[in-house]
Image (spheres, grey):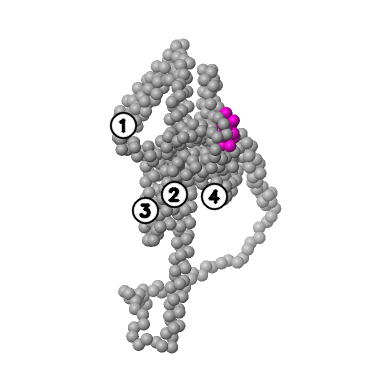
Amino acid sequence: MPLDYFTLTRQRKQHPAWRLLLADHAPLIASFLQHAFIGPNERILSNTELASRLEDMLFSLREALGDDAFPKSAARYLDDWAGDEKGWLRKFYPPGLDEAHFDLTPAAEKAIAWLDSLGGRSFVGTESRLLTVFELLQGMIEGAESDPTARIEELEKRKEAIDDEIARIRDGNLKVLDETALKDRFQQLGATAHELLTDFREVEQNFRELDRGVRERIALWEGGKGELLRDIFGEHDAIIDSDQGRSFRAFWDFLMSPSRQEELTKLLEKALALPPIKALNPDRRLKRIHYDWLEAGEQTQRTVARLSQQLRRYLDDQAWLENRRIMEVLHQIETRALAIRDKAPSDAFMRIDNPGARISLPMERPLYRPPFKPSIDDHIELAEDDGLDADALFEQTYVDKARLAAYIRQALQLQPQIGLPTLLEAHPLEQGLAELLTWLSLASGDDNALFDDSRRDQVTWTSADGARRSAGIPRIIFNR
């Protein structure tokens, strides 16, 4: 955006973030939104809960500043902040609920983040950001290199550097990061983690604007549904295939991996346990920041799902209207036919555009072929039953489905989600393929289970005869 005088003047009047900074009660608004949404990382709050929190803050402020400090009620303030002329809160009704809910808008979050950046920091790290720049540049150059020889040479250099470092460690020359370097990197980690949560709201806002545009277009559309769907799907694909959409999809696929989640959990626990990091009194929410990312990403995915539901509802309505129109046309034809039954017109009664006869010649039809009559021998020879073993009829495999379901419930008590390979590591397959099919049956009947057909997992077990078996299955994640 060019920062010329006229552009900034227009932004000053129209942008909600700038209007928040110019508001009369900007300190109240920013502090309350920070305390209610950004601080605890709340995505959606009901009208009752949010009004109760604001009423508590107004009560404490009126005691300190006087009863005339903030004359409006909490409900009126919330409705005012959610109005189109303010745009700091989004007021909506979730599906199936009759109580209004509120969410923070990306513009208000940007204004609060800028206010937060005004405060001085006791420690300003620069080394970690410089290293990040170098790592990003190296990743870009290596990822864009199409010459196999150059790629191999670069990997050989990295391998040589790793071998040299291993040799130095074996010689007793072990270098560790000092406290300053650890604080620098942790500060960069915290800033990036919170910026990701802010980006989720902006991505969700883009999909929500697309959904609103679709609803408005459907309400005013008078043409054919094919043309409307082509335009809508074109805009939807444009967002999905944009740089922002592809980056979000790659981030979501990476985060949905159970192994990545477990690895990230272990890394965060180890980092927060370091003495220099403990001395900083870090935010405890950083320990579960990846779960906050999942919650924010699921909210974005639900916004996309609502867009699909709106299109489905439009198609159902159009089909009903078209069927009704067909019945009206048929009724009109019957009514007019009965009206002229006794007085047939002398001239042409009906005209058919582009008439044509469909001719089927007799010689083009296949000749009759009598069915083949098989010869069946109805003589049954009775065998001696001395050598028959009837126990084989009762040696059937039975898999205890309740036992496997109990394993899932026990695992979800300790964590919000778990993948099927992780479950099988704790509870290996004892009955082979039959038990694996039972796991798949439990997942298909669970509404909270997620099937990711784009990713495959390999499951192995040992059969009764001692052979090693394996099967490829789609990625399955059980959720709480």
Residue carrying label 2:
211
Say above or below: 276 vs 351: above
- The residue drawn where x is 51% and y is 70% is 373
Residue carrying label 4:
95
- The residue drawn where x is 38% and y is 39% is 13
Label 4's element? loop
Inter-mark Cα distance, 3 to 4: 26 Å
Residue carrying label 1:
145
Q: Disc 3 marks which amino acid?
A: Asp
Q: Residues within 10 Å of mark 2 (few under 14, many from 20)?
A: many
Residue 213 lies in the magenta-colored region: no
Label 1's element? loop
On the image, the x and y values in percent for residue 348 come to 34, 83
- Looking at the image, is mark 3 or mark 2 earlier in the sequence? 2
In the rendered image, which quarter contains the N terminus? top left
What segment is highlighted magenta in the picture? 53-64
Residue 231 bears which disc, if any? Answer: 3
- Looking at the image, is mark 2 or mark 4 earlier in the sequence? 4
Q: Residues within 10 Å of mark 3 (few under 14, many from 20)?
A: few
